[in-house]
Image: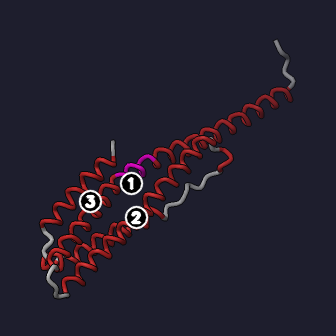
Amino acid sequence: MNFLIISLISSTIGGVAFFFIGDAGLMTANASILLSFEAIIAAAVLVRLNRGVPSLDWKSVDVEAADRLLRRLEEVAKVYIALIAMTLVSIVIILAILYVGTLQFDYKQNVIIGLSTVFGVILGVVLGRMTYVVWLDLDIVRLQSAVILSAAKAEDAKKQVEAASGKLAAIEAARLPRQ
C-alpha cells in the first residue's frame, strides 16, 4: 500500500474543500469543532507515542527479531512526532483564522481562504499519515507477537532440554543393564 499517494490525495481533497469553504463566518463557527478534532488527533498520537517495548527476558529473544522490532518502533515514533508537529501547526492556523476574522482590512477574505486552504492541506496530510501509522502499528503488533513467540519457544526448548537431561541422569543413576 502506497501511503504517500494516500497522503497526497487526502491533502489535495482537504485543500480544495477548505478553499471552497474558506468563508470567515463558516470557519469561525466551526473553529471549536476543528480544534476539538485536532486535539483528539494529538491526544491519540501522544497515547500511542507513550507505548513502551514489551517487557521480556531479552536474553531469550532472537536478536534479529528484536532489532527489527526496535527499528520499527523508532520509525513509528518519528512519524508520531511529525504528526504532532503538523497538528500543532494546523491548530495555530485555526487560531490565526479566528484572529484575522476579527480584523478589518481589504484582503481579509483572501487571507482567510489562503489559511483555510493551508489548513485543509495539513489536515489531509495528517489524516493520510494516520492511515500509515495504523498500518505501522499493525506491523509492530505482528513483530511483537513474533518476538514473544520466539522467546516462548526458546524458553520451552530450554525446559525440554533440562527435562531430558534430568531423565537421562535418572536413567544413568538407576544403572539399568543395557541391551
Residue at x 44%, y 46% (from the top left corner):
139
Q: Alpha-carbon distance for marks 2 and 1? A: 9 Å
Q: Residue 34 sits in which quadrant?
A: bottom left
Q: Earlier in the sequence, mark 1 or mark 3?
A: 3
Q: Are marks 2 and 1 in contact (CB under 8 Å)?
A: yes
Magenta stretch: give its range: 132-139
Q: Are marks 2 and 3 in contact (CB under 8 Å)?
A: no
The amino acid marked with disc number 1 is Val
The amino acid marked with disc number 2 is Val
Nearer mark to the viewer, of 2 and 3: 3
103 relative to 125 in the view: left or right:
left
Q: Are marks 1 and 3 in contact (CB under 8 Å)?
A: no
Q: Alpha-carbon distance for marks 1 and 3? A: 14 Å
Residue 40 disc label: none
Q: Earlier in the sequence, mark 2 or mark 1?
A: 2
Percent across and percent down for residue 77 are: 48, 58
Which element carries disc 3, helix, strand or loop?
helix
Which element carries disc 2, helix, strand or loop?
helix
Query: 165 and 146: which one is in front?
Result: 146
Residue under numbered circle 2: 45
